[in-house]
Image (cartoon, rainbow, N blue to C red):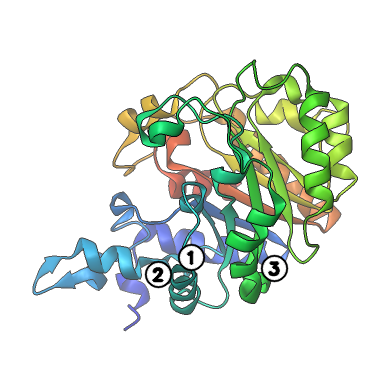
């Protein structure tokens, strides 16, 4: 049952019409993931997830995407970075998600990690080379073909390259010599974007490589990357006829520190004027050029992604 306007969480009612208007101009703004209990009574109506008089975490996580889509036109699925989702997962996701909602998905790290980090979750592979790195056939078989039936609902697929250790590449050119043939082999039915986290790779040949395939450079706010506003001013940084933006972290702040500081993501705690200004500039650029822009804001940027988005769009 839909709630009346009087029952709507206030933040949701403020955002809904603003984001819908921007979407009509091909500016799609959403968040990184969506299952955050900290957004209850802001974006999510607690009453929808009550079972026998008590809040049900299980019901919330199973059903809140539908309510999310009442406000946001797009969402970034970060979950897919950690594994190849099974076919039945995709069927369930696209069957239950509202038809109008658009997704961006991170490509599994099995494709984008060259050397597995020395971390317990990698088990015996920690520190070793990845035989699946930039393997286009594995990418197609395990990921792309499963998404093919839903390609009209997918805004972009994001190749996030976590920071390469120094022993991985001697230069940006060495990286591009492996990246370019992979990009050449990608099926044209999808939009693709590349997110790098080695600031030394931000140079003309990198942008030239992406531009030759109409693949977007992801403008990211992340601990070690140049500020987003700085990236925007680099000649040639806009490499495709669409834009992907991910506002993730304050420059210099580690992910773990942001999680500890901001969880459970109920309120904006650390305003970031520089990133907000860059996001507004991205919106204006897309509107002026009549080009699609997909902008994703993470809770770890300021503490509460919906609150950050409200502050950006109200101006």
Structural distance between the alpha carbons of marks 1 and 3: 14 Å
Judging by the rendered image, the residue that carries numbered circle 3 is: 24
User: In the rendered structure, which disc, 1 or 3, sits on the residue that comes first in sequence?
Assistant: 3
Q: Position of residue 10 (x, y in %)?
A: 37, 59
Q: Residue at x 83, y 44 (%)?
A: 181
Q: Residue at x 83, y 25 (%)?
A: 173
Q: Residues within 10 Å of mark 2 (few under 14, many from 20)?
A: some
Q: Residues within 10 Å of mark 1 (few under 14, many from 20)?
A: many
In the depicted structure, whether residue 241 falls above or below residue 301:
below
Q: Nearer the viewer, residue 54 or 202?
A: 202
Q: Residue at x 31, y 44 (%)?
A: 266
Structural distance between the alpha carbons of marks 2 and 3: 20 Å
Is label 2 or label 3 in front? 2
Q: Nearer the viewer, residue 165 or 215?
A: 165
Q: Residues within 10 Å of mark 3 (few under 14, many from 20)?
A: few
| Disc 1 and disc 2 in contact, CB within 8 angstroms | yes
Is label 1 or label 2 in front? 2
In the rendered structure, the answer to whether residue 299 lies left or right of residue 282 reads: left
User: In the rendered structure, which disc, 2 or 3, sits on the residue that comes first in sequence?
Assistant: 3
Q: Quadrant of the N terminus?
A: bottom left
In the rendered structure, the answer to whether residue 232 lies left or right of residue 71 reads: right
Q: Position of residue 136 (x, y in %)?
A: 71, 52
Question: Within the image, what quadrant is residue 255 found in?
Answer: top left
Judging by the rendered image, the residue that carries numbered circle 1 is: 71
Judging by the rendered image, the residue that carries numbered circle 2 is: 67
């Amino acid at each position: 049952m839909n709630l009346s306007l009087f029952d709507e969480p206030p933040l949701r009612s403020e955002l809904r019409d603003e984001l819908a208007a921007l979407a009509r101009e091909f500016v799609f703004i959403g968040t990184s993931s969506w299952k955050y209990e900290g957004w209850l009574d802001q974006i999510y109506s607690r009453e929808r997830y009550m079972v026998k008089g008590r809040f049900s975490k299980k019901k919330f996580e199973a059903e809140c995407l539908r309510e999310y889509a009442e406000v946001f036109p797009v969402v970034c699925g970060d979950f897919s970075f950690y594994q190849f989702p099974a076919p039945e997962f995709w069927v369930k996701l696209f069957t239950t998600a509202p038809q109008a909602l658009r997704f961006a998905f991170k490509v599994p790290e099995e494709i984008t990690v060259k050397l597995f980090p020395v971390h317990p979750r990698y088990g015996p592979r920690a520190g070793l080379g990845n035989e699946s790195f930039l393997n286009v056939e594995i990418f197609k078989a395990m990921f792309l073909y499963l998404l093919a039936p839903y390609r009209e609902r997918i805004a972009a697929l994001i190749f996030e390259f976590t920071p390469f250790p120094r022993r991985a590449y001697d230069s940006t050119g060495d990286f591009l010599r492996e990246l370019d043939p992979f990009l050449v082999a990608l099926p044209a039915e999808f939009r693709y974007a590349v997110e790098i986290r080695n600031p030394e790779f931000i140079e003309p040949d990198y942008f030239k490589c992406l531009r030759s395939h109409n693949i977007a450079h992801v403008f990211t706010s992340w601990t070690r990357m140049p500020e987003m506003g700085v990236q925007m001013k680099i000649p040639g940084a806009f490499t495709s006829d669409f834009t992907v933006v991910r506002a993730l972290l304050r420059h210099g702040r580690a992910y773990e520190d942001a999680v500890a500081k901001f969880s459970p993501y109920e309120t904006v705690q650390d305003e970031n004027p520089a990133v907000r200004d860059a996001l507004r500039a991205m919106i204006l650029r897309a509107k002026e050029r009549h080009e699609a822009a997909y902008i994703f804001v993470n809770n770890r940027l300021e503490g509460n992604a919906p609150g950050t988005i409200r502050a950006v769009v109200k101006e």
